[in-house]
Image: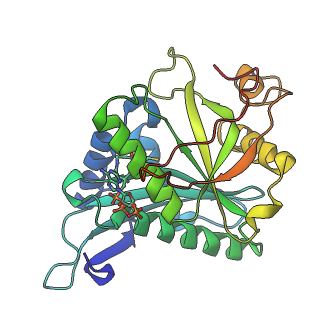
Amino acid sequence: MREAEIVCWEALDPVSAEMQQARHLYESTLDEAERIPWLWIEKAVTSRATWRPGRWSPHLLLSARRRRSRLPGPVAGFAYGMHLPGYGGYACYLGVEPRFRGQGIGSRLMSLLVRVLQVDAACEGVHLPFVVVESHEPDAPESTKDSALWQARLRLFRRVGARHLSGLTFRAPNFMRRSAGPVPLQLFLIPVDKPAETFDGAALRGVAAGLLQHVYGRSERDPLYRETLPPDCRPALEVLAPSRNGAIALERHPQSSGSP
Ligand SMILES: CC(C)(COP(=O)(O)OP(=O)(O)OC[C@H]1O[C@@H](n2cnc3c(N)ncnc32)[C@H](O)[C@@H]1OP(=O)(O)O)[C@@H](O)C(=O)NCCC(=O)NCCS
């Protein structure tokens, strides 16, 4: 599909047919453990009109094929993310309807989100150092379906310039089932206005710690914080490179004591 055939825009009306389509995509493309309640996203869309610098700046971006009338068709993909003042960008959710996958919609939405978050940073009068992305590695990597999906994610991250933050497993609370254990996630970083080479171990610890503190409200004394960032963890930024068989595998550095 040519770039010009895909169009993207920001959802600004929480009560609309396109929001219902986005909700359906959100709930059908992402596992429950990875999601937050849709109502939170709806509230974020409602809050756009009153957003001012200094606050979290969330965006729900939508994508569709352009119709002959030049207007967008039904929603085929969404990306949700936000700028966190004093921290950076956080790409939370991304999903594309199965029949529209592999046509560049996911990469286009993610790249657009980075640009929108750069505008938020500019509104604050600062640069955007990075955008961080969380992703849950499949529990059953031997399943063909799970492995294809994981490869699609990794290839998309690679295409938008993301690197893997190796050496730690991020522990996020399960918002949909509070009684369930934490969700283990891998972190990926898109360096934006700060060169990738400047993200050393201390800076990367700061990225993970900032996510725990700003987004999840966890202090250094919290078990999730200690499990994510045990004193001996040594995070590093790894390029996502395909191996000879074309698949991308994550670098496995010595596991820290907080990892399973
Ligand atoms: C991951 C996802 C968003 C990708 O969306 P998409 O529109 O297909 O992505 P793109 O077309 O931009 O393709 C991105 C890369 O993935 C590759 N890809 C797409 N589908 C693939 C598949 N089934 N197997 C392997 N690679 C695949 C593309 O070839 C491309 O890689 P390339 O640049 O090396 O050619 C989509 O598969 C999806 O919605 N999955 C379910 C939800 C999800 O996993 N969200 C991400 C959470 S972090």
Q: 99 left or right of 61?
A: left
Quadrant (top left/top right/bottom left/bottom right) for the C terminus? top right
For image coordinates 71% across by 29% down, the residue present is: 228
Residue 32, placed above or below residue 129: above
Q: Is residue 201 visible?
A: yes
Percent across and percent down for residue 81 are: 53, 56
- Count of numbered tags: 0
For image coordinates 72% across by 72% down, the residue present is: 193
Closest to the observer, 221 or 54: 221
Q: 95 left or right of 220?
A: left
Residue 226, placed above or below residue 133: above
Percent across and percent down for residue 79 are: 43, 58
Percent across and percent down for residue 239 are: 63, 56
Q: Is residue 42 visible?
A: no
Outermost residue on the left side: it is 68
Q: 135 left or right of 199?
A: left
Percent across and percent down for residue 205 are: 80, 42
Quadrant (top left/top right/bottom left/bottom right) for the N terminus? bottom left
For image coordinates 69% across by 67% down, the residue present is: 53
